[in-house]
Image (cartoon, rainbow, N blue to C red):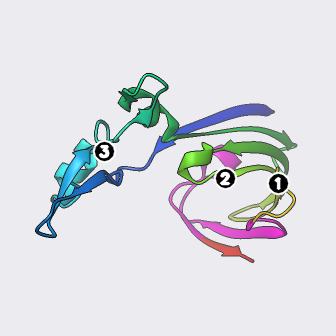
Amino acid sequence: SISLMSDVNKLLVPTPPIWLTTPPGQSIVQHGKNPFVSTPVGMLQSFWDAPGILKEDGTRSRFQEELNEIAIGVGLEYWYNETIAFRWGYFHEHESKGSRKYYTVGVGINYKVISLDGSYLIPTKSRHPLRDTYRLTVSLAFGGTSEPSMKSPALSYNLDE
């Protein structure tokens, strides 16, 4: 069977504001929101706290910066005989928010209650911190079915090199 997957995510953390330093040595937020708030407030505020991208006319586009904080991943998975999986994926993050962009290729093997999955990251830039990254995951299904999409609950251990 063939599956197409997608992932759209945004970190629920405050975006650093642009600070204005006043003469007595105090700082006030010039653009954006104060990041020193409680965790629940910071999570909610993360949807509208960006200081904004400076446009040519001198205004700031807060909406555009909030859109840049969204990372997108897509993947394709093919299962042969519900035993061996072949996977391909792509992850994209905006340049101003980390610039992680890479392809992934992987293989998975499923036998009864144990699964072994391996993947390799292929960054789009030649000198990238994620180059030569291998991932290996071993999963055990407890009381579930052995079908790959039906494993639950499971115990997983992910080993990143």
Mark 1 and mark 3 lie on one chain; the one further toward the N terminus is: 3
Q: x, y (%) of residue 97?
A: 54, 49
In the rendered view, tell whether residue 152 sits above or below residue 60.
below
Which residue position holds label 2? 100
Residue 86 pos. (x, y %): 86, 47
Q: Residue 57 bears which disc, if any?
A: none
Asked if the residues shown at circle 2 and circle 3 are in contact, with their CB atoms under 8 angstroms apart, the answer is no
Residue in front for this viewpoint, 45 or 27? 27
Residue at 80% x, 69% y: name it: 134
Q: Name the residue under label 1.
A: 125
The residue that disc 3 covers is 46
Quarter in which the C terminus is drawn: bottom right
Q: Distance between the residues labelled 2 and 3?
A: 20 Å
- Residue at x 63%, y 68% (from the top left corner): 140
Residue 12 magenta-highlighted = no
Cα distance in 3D space between marks 1 and 2: 9 Å
* Mark found first going from the N terminus, 2 or 3: 3
Q: Which residue type does callout 2 highlight? A: Arg
The three-letter code of the residue at mark 1 reads Lys
